[in-house]
Image (spheres, rainbow, N blue to C red):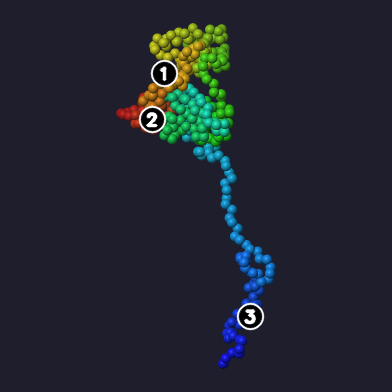
Amino acid sequence: MSSPAGRTNASPHHHLRERKRKADPKREQPSKFQSSNTTDLNDEPVEIKRPIAKKTKTNKSSAEQRLKRYRETAPASIQAIYERALSQRMFCLDRQRGGSEDCPTEVLKIAGSTGNVYTVKIDRLPSCDCPHARRGNECKHVLFVLVRVLKATNYWQRAYLASELREIFSKAPPIVPVDAERCDNDRKPIHEEDTCPICFMEFQDGLEGTVYCKAACGNNIHKECFDQWAASRKRSAAPVTCPFCRSRWIDADGSQGRISIDMLKQRSINSEGYINVAQDLGISTQRDYSTYHSFWVRREARRGADVGDWYDPDPF
């Protein structure tokens, strides 16, 4: 049977879907992400929501980073090195301040306990060119500089911040050249119980008729006694040294004893690769191994180091 004119054939399912569509109000609402060229049948403005871009985290912290782990206190591992730095005789031959105002540094020439001259640099990562430090160890020369020369209170740090370096150098003793023209402020006063190290007699006339060590310790000596001491040293072709500290003696005119950088440049390098000033300072070139661990002494002996009687490879 043909359908009436002007009407289309539609299945019952089609009419059912149409009724559901008209009854569902959600179908007439625009999409949340409707594009701008979509026409709203209700003539109402459509809010177009776009995904919010994620904010990238920026590191606002520009704090300086320490090059080694911070130490709260001095570790037990450096106790033996610290004791050697304070008990063994070493000498500061030269100090040169460098770096910048924000991050100062200092380079020092240190005569070690056997007279070898090492270069110690105090900066963000303190260093020394001695064999022990070159192997990555903490050495006594750096501790000697921090404790004895610079008077640093946080000497146990392996690395420093620029602010810590500024504080260390601001509180350190000033760099003053050691020469004969300096004032007598380094001369020690004579006390009632003090005696001459040569004749062991008291200084009855005070400073009259005395001389003192201008190179290092500042102790007083009878001039007559010292003249005899100096003459005996010269007869044996030995350098004239202070009877107290054994530093090379500096005369009133400064003609002896001063170890300058120019003097070091003229010296030859020894078999260990360093300049040695043991004779100038009146010290022995034999290393004292009494405070070193026996295992370390044996290892150094096997490497060819002269450890004297501190290690016997064939004890039986």
Label 2 is placed on what type of residue? Val
* Residue 25, placed above or below residue 178: below
- Give the mark nearest the N terminus, 2 or 3: 3
Q: Position of residue 274 (x, y in %)?
A: 40, 25
- C-alpha distance separating marks 1 and 2: 25 Å
* Residue 224, placed above or below residue 75: above
- Identified at 44% across, 24% down, the residue is 117
Q: Which residue is mark 3?
A: 19
* Residue 24, placed above or below residue 156: below
Closest to the observer, 125 or 158: 125
On the question of residue 124 being in view, the answer is yes
Image quadrant for the C terminus? top left
Q: Position of residue 33 (x, y in %)?
A: 61, 65
Disc 3 crowd rating (10 Å Cα; few below 14, some 14-19, many 20+) is few
- Give the mark nearest the N terminus, 3 or 1: 3
**Secondary structure at numbered mark 2:** helix
Q: In this rendering, would 167 be left or right of 115?
A: right
Q: Position of residue 287 (x, y in %)?
A: 40, 24
CB under 8 Å between callouts 2 and 3?
Answer: no
**Secondary structure at numbered mark 3:** helix
- Identified at 46% across, 21% down, the residue is 261
**Tag nearer the camera, 1 or 2:** 1
Q: Which mark is residue 297?
A: 2
Q: Which residue is mark 1?
A: 279
Label 1 is placed on what type of residue? Gln
- Identified at 62% across, 66% down, the residue is 37
Which residue extends farthest front?
5
